[in-house]
């Protein structure tokens, strides 16, 4: 039995959000042109784009478990915490994360 590593690819978020905007909100397409014109969308860009298009919904609490963050996004969240002098609880509320997740990230990245 061969053990091959599969490359994990992200969905093409630019196309997904462009299609959503064209079909549901064509009048708002110009608002999001700056984010959609980026070469690579980070996890934080995707979350921000989703929040701006659909608004802040409390339904996300169930979907929160399914989010995954890449290393640059984690580092930018931790830098945000240092810049704004937030504790783990305040940062968790701001980004809708678990305090334990933030503590684990801080141990992992030694920030």
Image (cartoon, rainbow, N blue to C red):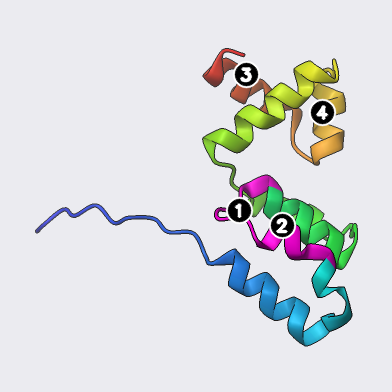
Labels 1 and 4: the sequence-earlier one: 1
Q: CA distance from mark 2 to mark 1?
A: 8 Å
Say which element carries label 4: helix
Tags 2 and 1 touching, CB below 8 Å: yes
Q: Going by the picture, which residue comes out furthest to the left?
A: 1
Q: Which span is picked out in magenta? A: 31-44
Disc 1 designates what residue?
41
Say which element carries label 2: helix
| Quarter in which the N terminus is drawn | bottom left
| Quarter in which the C terminus is drawn | top right
Q: Going by the picture, which residue comes out furthest to the bottom?
A: 23
Dot in front, 2 or 1: 2
Disc 4 designates what residue?
91
Asked if one can make out residue 25 in the rendered structure from this viewpoint, the answer is yes
Disc 2 designates what residue?
35
Say which element carries label 1: loop
Q: Residue at x 19, y 55 (%)?
A: 4
Left or right of residue 15, residue 32 in this image = right
Disc 3 designates what residue?
106
Tags 2 and 4 touching, CB below 8 Å: no
Q: Compared with residue 72, is residue 56 higher up or lower down, i.e. above or below?
A: below
Left or right of residue 3, residue 106 in this image = right
Say which element carries label 3: helix
């Amino acid at each position: 039995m061969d053990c091959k590593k599969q490359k994990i690819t992200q969905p093409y978020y630019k196309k997904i959000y462009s299609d959503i905007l064209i079909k549901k909100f064509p009048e708002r397409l110009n608002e999001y042109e700056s984010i959609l014109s980026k070469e690579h969308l980070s996890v934080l860009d995707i979350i921000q784009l989703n929040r701006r298009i659909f608004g802040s919904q409390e339904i996300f609490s169930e979907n929160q478990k399914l989010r995954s963050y890449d290393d640059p996004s984690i580092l930018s969240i931790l830098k945000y915490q240092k810049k704004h002098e937030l504790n783990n609880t305040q940062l968790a509320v701001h980004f809708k994360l678990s305090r334990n997740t933030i503590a684990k990230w801080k141990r992992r990245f030694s920030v």
